[in-house]
């Protein structure tokens, strides 16, 4: 039989010392691991905020570029408002045959005109439909302002032929376009605005025309907004306007700030 006097094990003191040493080693390792782990989560938060801000700014820029010429306006740096368009084309400036009423009459109220080209040749999302609005030579000034209805008329019917015949509510447009152009305002989004309120960026659409932007509501584009600043520049230029957009998002101690510009055609 084995001599039991030669068998040895750990004492309680040795076990306690091992536990203490492992604890010290674990604490030292944790100090070195904590910074990379914290940096990883900080990077994730910054990336999420950057992605949210970039997505919102790109959506705003895409929508703003469709604005009806001279329809951009703002009452504060927290809101920008405009009338969107989905298509544009040219109207017939002279009758095909004298007296056939195929041209758009600016000397008196008119109820129909021919579009140069065919509506069905346009992409489906840009085709003119009943309920859309036709806008002609909007200048955004008194007497030629789409917000007050001076330069717009509602489409009743659209009939394709060699040229598309567009029937509208009786209207005498104040001014003819130098290039015989008209714009089409979609029936389901006759006005759009972007508003920062209560830490949220909203997109409002198809509400009643008014003298000021809505205070809040609409679809949420981004949360965690700590500040936003919209600047409309160059509205007095004849050809272009510039919208400057600055968004700052903050969450859990992380903050990102993105700046974007959108150029808008002012030529009516």
Image (cartoon, grey):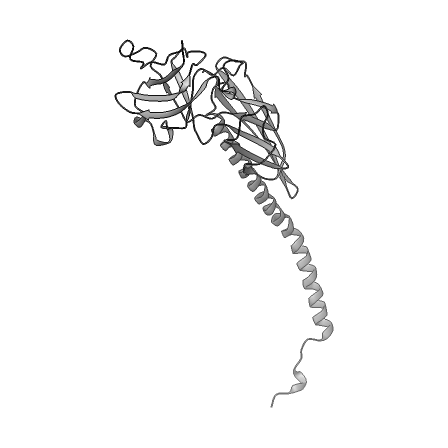
Name the spot of residue 98 as percent of width and height, x first.
28, 9
Please state the total of marks drawn on the protein image: 0
Toward which corner of the image does residue 201 lie, by quadrant? top right
In depth, the one of 7 and 100 nearer the eye is 100
**Residue 35 versus residue 124 in the image, above or below:** below
Identified at 64% across, 51% down, the residue is 34
> Could you tell me which residue is drawn at 66 percent across and 59 percent down?
26
Above or below 105: residue 250? below
Image quarter hosting the N terminus: bottom right
Quadrant housing the C terminus: top left
Which residue shows up at 49% across the image and 20% down it? 149
- Seen from the viewer's position, the closer of residues 258 and 219 is 219
**Is 3 left, or right, of 128 in this rendering?**
right
Residue 52 x, y percent position in the rendering: 54, 38
Q: Quadrant of residue 235?
A: top right
Foreground residue, 193 or 173? 173
User: In the figure, is residue 85 to the left or right of 101?
Assistant: right
- From the viewer's perspective, tell me whether residue 19 is left or right of residue 58: right
Identify which residue is drawn at 72% across, 74% down. 12
Vertical arrangement, residue 14 with respect to residue 222, above or below: below
Where is residue 29 drawn, in percent x and y?
65, 55
Where residue 47 sits: x, y (%)? 56, 41
């Amino acid at each position: 039989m084995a001599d039991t006097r030669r068998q040895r094990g750990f004492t309680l003191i040795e076990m306690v010392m091992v536990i203490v040493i492992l604890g010290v080693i674990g604490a030292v390792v944790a100090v070195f691991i904590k910074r990379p782990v914290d940096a990883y989560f900080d990077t994730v938060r910054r990336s999420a905020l950057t992605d949210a801000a970039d997505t919102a700014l790109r959506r705003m820029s895409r929508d703003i570029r469709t604005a009806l010429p001279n329809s951009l306006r703002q009452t504060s740096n927290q809101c920008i408002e405009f009338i969107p368009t989905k298509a544009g084309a040219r109207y017939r400036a002279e009758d095909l045959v004298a007296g056939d009423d195929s041209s758009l009459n600016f000397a008196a109220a008119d109820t129909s005109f021919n579009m140069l080209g065919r509506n069905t040749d346009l992409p489906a999302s840009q085709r003119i439909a009943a309920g859309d609005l036709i806008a002609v030579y909007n200048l955004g000034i008194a007497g030629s302002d789409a917000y007050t209805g001076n330069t717009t008329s509602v489409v009743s019917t659209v009939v394709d032929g060699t040229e598309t015949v567009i029937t509208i509510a009786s209207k005498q447009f104040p001014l003819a376009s130098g290039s015989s152009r008209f714009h089409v305002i979609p029936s389901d989004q006759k006005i759009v605005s972007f508003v920062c309120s209560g830490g949220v960026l909203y997109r409002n659409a198809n509400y009643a025309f008014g003298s000021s932007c809505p205070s809040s509501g609409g679809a949420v584009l981004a949360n965690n907004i700590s500040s936003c600043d919209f600047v409309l520049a160059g509205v007095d230029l004849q050809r272009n306007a510039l919208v400057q957009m600055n968004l700052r998002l903050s969450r859990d101690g992380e903050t990102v700030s993105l700046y974007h510009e959108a150029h808008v055609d002012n030529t009516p």
